[in-house]
Image (tube, grey):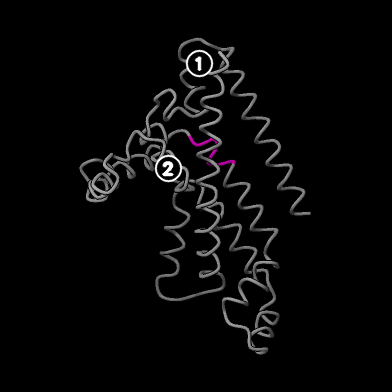
Amino acid sequence: MAADFWSPVSLSIKIALLSGIIVFILGTVAARMMAGKKFNGSVLIETLFLLPLVLPPSVVGFLLIVIFGNNSPAGRAIEWLFHMPVMFTWWAAVIASIVVAFPLMYQSAKTGFEAIDGDIENAARVDGASEWKVFIRVSLPLAVKAILAGAILSFARALGEFGATLMFAGNIPGRTQTMSTAIYVAMDSGNMQMAWLWVGTMIIISFVMLVLVHIIRE
């Protein structure tokens, strides 16, 4: 029973951590590039970045299968490079988690960057700082609360991802079964004890994540 319980828990945390790190980097960089920028196509790019936030998980899962499925160019390229398909692997769950968690990280980081007084960044540029130094030494420290809040929310979103993961990664015990899919299977089979254990674990982790967000934002 212990192994049956911990396998989805450890896999969910591993997937959430890896996807969270990737989303943290991609979301922060994308937010910095888009913050305060208005150009032709900016609305379209912004909409594409935030679209997974409002799309049904089944639609996200369908699109991931179309893009990365075994018959797609990207799917065949991945299979050729790594000698295995991406579908029905834990990497598929990572990709699904990245897609659904990215908008939270992007939106939070962008809000943080846009709240920075532009005069502070310009003063650093006048003093001879390169754009990279301005980003690392000025922009990031000033937006750190929003960025950390976005990272925590992204981790929590990745941890609880269900629909897209189920379609794209499947529900293979010990390989792709996360806590969310394990809860679904446990309820469907009438194993309410295991379902409650996973539900309780998810609630505790999510509660802690939200408390951390509240503390950071104060």
Task: Indicate the quadrant where residue 55 lies.
Answer: top left
In the image, taking residue 3 as reference, residue 128 lies left or right, namely right
Callout 2: helix, strand or loop?
helix
Residue nearest the viewer, comparing 53 with 183: 183
Callout 1: helix, strand or loop?
helix
Residue nearest the viewer, comparing 127 with 148: 127
Q: Which quadrant would the N terminus be assigned to in this image?
A: top right
What is the magenta range?
156-161
In the rendered view, tell whether residue 36 sits above or below residue 76. Answer: below
Residue ID for mark 2: 96
In the rendered view, tell whether residue 170 sits above or below residue 138. Answer: above
In the rendered view, tell whether residue 194 sits above or below residue 181. Answer: above
In the image, taking residue 19 as reference, residue 208 lies left or right, namely right
Residue ID for mark 1: 187
Identify residue type, mark 1: Met
Please rate how many residues cluster around mark 1, counting C-alpha atoms within 10 Å: few if below 14, some from 14 to 19, many from 20: some
- x 56%, y 70%: residue: 35
Residue 2 lies, in percent from the top left, at 58, 16
Q: Which quadrant would the C terminus be assigned to in this image?
A: bottom right
Kindly indicate whether the residue at mark 2 contacts the one at mark 1 (C-beta within 8 angstroms).
no
